[in-house]
Structures are given as structure tokens and as C-alpha cells.
Amino acid sequence: MRKAIKRFMARRASGWRSTRHLEARLRFPGMTVHEALIRVTHKRIFGVWPDLDTPRTISEKICWLKLHDRLAVCGEITDKFRMRSYVERHGLGHLLNDLHAVLNSAEAVDFRALPDAYALKVTNGSAWNVIKRPGVPIDENAARRRLDGWIRTNMADHKGEW
């Protein structure tokens, strides 16, 4: 119990949101937040530290790109909504799914105007979806709370991406 309290207090005092963030800060004190977080996340997923000086695996290369690739197109193609215009500009708009609405807040969602089955997604996250299945009721307030939390999340700080 005492260790759990110390971990909680250390996280609160550091201003970092998770043990992954705290570990990154403690293991790599002189490194940028983004690079330290990418290294710790890679280690947790694959069990080995990434070699970012000479990346050999696809995962290491993706980590390297997160840190060093600053092409303007990266910001566009990592956003679900902005990616649509990129796809259309390259003549592949016919491959896109139907889009019912683009909203700036969860409060603006009109659940009655949506079809019987749909997915609500935020543009800044991955696997953050509210799925409405046909014939199954949805708790609108819970869906709004989840969406609002996701909208407020800064993915650059959360995932170590610029």
C-alpha cells in the first residue's frame, strides 16, 4: 500500500500522467520528453530498447521517423479528417467511407439524426471510438463524456509524437 501511495504522489508531483511518462523522465533525464517516451514505450511493447542511431526493424524506423521526420504532410495524414482531403486530392476519394458530420465538441452530437448503426471518432486518437450497433441503445451522456475526454487529450504528450 505504501509503495502505491508513493507511486501516486510521484506521478502527481512530476506532472506526468502515467508510469510510462514517469519512467521516461527518470531513465532519460537529459533527453526530450518525446524521445524518452518513445524509447520507454518501445521497450514495454517489444522487450528491447530501440536502436535509434541505426534503426534496423520497422518499429525502430517508425520510432526514428516520429522524432526526425518533420514533413508538413505528416500532420495532415495523421489526422483522420484532414487525411480525407489528402486522399481526395490524390484521386482516391471513392475509397472513403460516408461521413455524417464533423463537430468540434461532443455536446454538438445530435444522436437522433444519426443512423441506427454508426461510429463516433475523434481525429486525434487511435482506437478511440464510440460504436453504436443496430438495435442496441446507447448511453448518450456516457458517450459525450468519453468523447470530451478524448478531445482534451494532447496526443503529442501522450504518445511522444510531435
Image: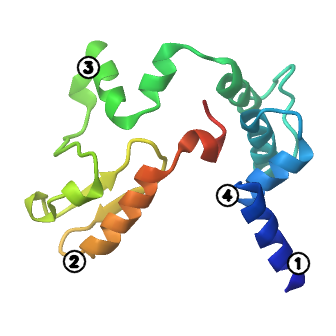
In the image, 41 versus 144, the foreground residue is 144
The amino acid pointed to by label 1 is Lys
Disc on res. 137? 2
Marks 3 and 2, how far apart in space?
34 Å
Q: In what element is the residue under mark 2?
A: loop
Marks 1 and 4, how far apart in space?
17 Å
Q: In this view, does 161 lie to the left or right of 113?
A: right
Question: Which residue, as the protein is rendered here, is positioned at the far front?
Answer: 13
- Give me the residue at 59% from left, 16% from top: 70
Where residue 18 appears, as percent x and y from the top left, is 70, 59
Dot placed on the residue nearer the N-terminal end, 2 or 1? 1
The amino acid pointed to by label 3 is Glu
Where residue 131 appears, as percent x and y from the top left, is 32, 62
Q: In what element is the residue under mark 3?
A: helix
Q: How crowded is mark 1: few (under 14 residues within 10 Å), some or many (20 or more)?
A: few
58 versus 37 height, above or below: above
| Residues at marks 2 and 1 touching, judged by CB atoms closer than 8 Å | no
The amino acid pointed to by label 2 is Pro
Disc on res. 88? 3
| Residues at marks 2 and 4 touching, judged by CB atoms closer than 8 Å | no
127 versus 93 height, above or below: below
Marks 3 and 4, how far apart in space?
37 Å
